[in-house]
Amino acid sequence: MKKPLIIFVISALIGLGLGYLVFDVIAPGQSQPEVAVNDKEDSKSSEEATEETDKTVAVSDDNILQAKGCLGCHAVSGLNLEGGATGPDLTQAFNNIEGKHGKPLAEFLKEPTSAVMSSVIGGNPLTDEEISQVVEALKKAAE
């Protein structure tokens, strides 16, 4: 009887510790610099340069992907955002989610069809405004 209880307590402590590390990677109030996606040749037209700077994303608490903890498990290389390696890179999520899960990204974020995302989003559902911000960010990443 004691052995299963001890195993349970140890597992719970490990799980809580890992959860803290994954979802609270950056201490609250700590800001990070802006990251620009501009690694192409310098010989672009001004219109092309403007399109590239439109993909600049501030990596701070006002970034929806950081604020909602997405970067704890996912990276978004299309926006030059480093994140966790647990989940897949979300750069093409805007284009690929419907084919993979049978519904557009906004619908998936409301009612995820994957077991992992169902538990993650189910515990902390996104508002309609947050969903539209995530969709816009991932749409930029896919461009």
Image: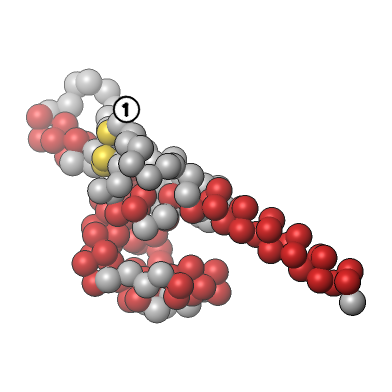
Give the quarter of the image for residue 105.
Answer: bottom left
Count of numbered circles in the view: 1
Q: Position of residue 97 (x, y in %)?
A: 40, 67
Establish if 140 lies above or below 33.
below
Residue that appears at 45% across and 75% down: 122
- Image check: 131 left or right of 122? left
Q: Quadrant of residue 29?
A: top left
Residue where numbered disc 1 is placed: 39
**Left or right: residue 73 compared with residue 34:** right
Is residue 99 something that shows in the picture?
A: no
Quadrant placement of the N terminus: bottom right
Crowding at dot 1, Cα within 10 Å, few <14 / some 14-19 / many 20+, comes out as few
Name the kind of residue labelled 1 in the image: Asp
Percent position (x, y) of residue 137?
27, 53
Task: Identify the image quadrant of residue 135.
Answer: bottom left
Colour convention: secondary structure
Is residue 1 in view from this perspective?
yes
Q: Secondary structure at mark 1?
A: loop
Residue in front for this viewpoint, 84 or 42: 84
Q: Residue at x 30, y 31 (%)?
A: 33
Residue lying at 49% horizontally and 74% vertically, measured from the top left: 118
Residue sticking out furthest to the front: 2
Decide if residue 68 is on the left or right side of residue 45.
right
Q: Is residue 64 above or below residue 41?
A: below
Residue 83 percent across, percent down from the top left: 46, 45
The residue lying at 54 percent from left, 69 percent from top is 116
